[in-house]
């Protein structure tokens, strides 16, 4: 079953209620080196308790995923070490992943493991979107990192979502419905009919049926998404 939209929103990056997004400027990355092919990481997969809420990360931790959107790998490692004893997950986004690679993620996780007896779960916010075969290959490529959650774009369609889910059976595939930067005019410009909430609900239902076990939407759509696909 899919996680509630409230959970998915809670664990995703901060979302503006107006469905607009902003991005702060970043400093140029440092010239850092990291092993591009880290060994597989043994991490405890998260489970779904009978209450319907996801048991995410070590028990008793604050239900927070800290976004490691740092300007360089060294800073990301420092942040990971500082927060790891207290939070449930560390979120690595596309910018950081493209800059530092899987080796960079491994270095951040190593810093987290040095700082906490039970390290946080890994949330890879990569928003994969390509043909099913390519997304399946991308999912296989991140499997050694043992991510608890990996995001994909629901607009990639049911076959793409299913391909990711099949390659990462121990990972929750989180389907991003409609980007929070898009309003009705932006949707129309891309050929998507209706309001954002209508598009979100269509994509949420499709994604869950295809195998997504988490959803990402804005706070404006949480209640209606829960009503459409259930709280789990």
Image (cartoon, rainbow, N blue to C red):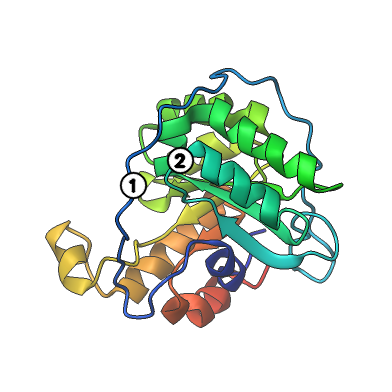
Determine contact: label 2, label 1, CB under 8 Å: yes
- Labels in figure, total: 2
Dot 2 corresponds to which residue?
72
Residue 190 in the image: state x and y as whole percent.
17, 56
Q: Is residue 232 left or right of residue 178?
A: right
Image quadrant in which the N terminus is located: bottom right
Callout 1: 10 Å neighbours few (<14), some, many (20+)? few
Q: Give the residue displayed 44% in from the left and 77% down from the top.
A: 221
Name the N-terminal-most of marks 2 and 1: 1
Residue 167 in the image: state x and y as whole percent.
60, 31
State the CA–CA distance, disc 2 to disc 1: 8 Å
The answer to whether residue 96 is seen in the rendering is yes
Dot 1 corresponds to which residue?
27
Between 138 and 1, the one nearer to me in the picture:
138
Q: Quadrant of residue 87?
A: bottom right
Q: Give the residue displayed 26% in from the left and 66% down from the top.
A: 182
Image quadrant in which the C terminus is located: bottom right
Q: Quadrant of residue 217?
A: bottom left
Residue 222 in the image: state x and y as whole percent.
51, 77
The answer to whether residue 167 is seen in the rendering is no
Dot 1 lies on which element? loop
Between 26 and 150, the one nearer to me in the picture:
26
Q: Is residue 55 left or right of residue 213?
A: right
Q: Quadrant of residue 133?
A: top left
Q: Which mark is residue 200?
A: none
Q: Is residue 167 above or below residue 14?
A: above
Q: Give the residue displayed 54% in from the left and 39% down from the top.
A: 74
Q: Is residue 164 above or below residue 12?
A: above
Considering every residue shown, the one lying at the far left of the view is 189
Q: Is residue 37 above or below residue 20?
A: above
């Amino acid at each position: 079953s899919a996680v509630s939209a409230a959970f998915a929103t809670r664990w995703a990056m901060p979302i503006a209620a107006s469905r607009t997004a902003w991005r702060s400027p970043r400093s140029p990355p440092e010239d850092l080196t990291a092993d591009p092919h880290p060994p597989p990481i043994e991490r405890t997969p998260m489970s779904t308790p009978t209450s319907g809420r996801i048991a995410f990360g070590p028990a008793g931790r604050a239900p927070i995923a800290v976004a490691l959107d740092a300007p360089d790998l060294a800073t990301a490692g420092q942040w990971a070490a500082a927060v790891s004893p207290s939070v449930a997950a560390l979120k690595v986004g596309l910018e950081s992943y493209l800059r530092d690679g899987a080796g960079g993620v491994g270095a951040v996780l190593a810093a987290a493991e040095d700082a906490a007896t039970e390290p946080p779960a890994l949330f890879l916010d990569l928003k994969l979107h390509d043909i099913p075969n390519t997304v399946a290959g991308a999912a296989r490529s991140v499997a050694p990192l043992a991510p608890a959650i990996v995001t994909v774009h629901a607009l990639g369609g049911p076959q793409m979502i299913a391909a990711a889910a099949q390659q990462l059976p121990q990972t929750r595939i989180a389907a991003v419905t409609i980007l929070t930067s898009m309003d009705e005019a932006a949707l129309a410009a891309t050929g998507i009919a209706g309001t954002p909430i209508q598009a979100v609900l269509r994509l949420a239902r499709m994604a869950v049926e295809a195998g997504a076990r988490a959803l990402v939407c804005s706070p404006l759509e949480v209640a209606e998404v829960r009503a459409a696909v259930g709280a789990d």
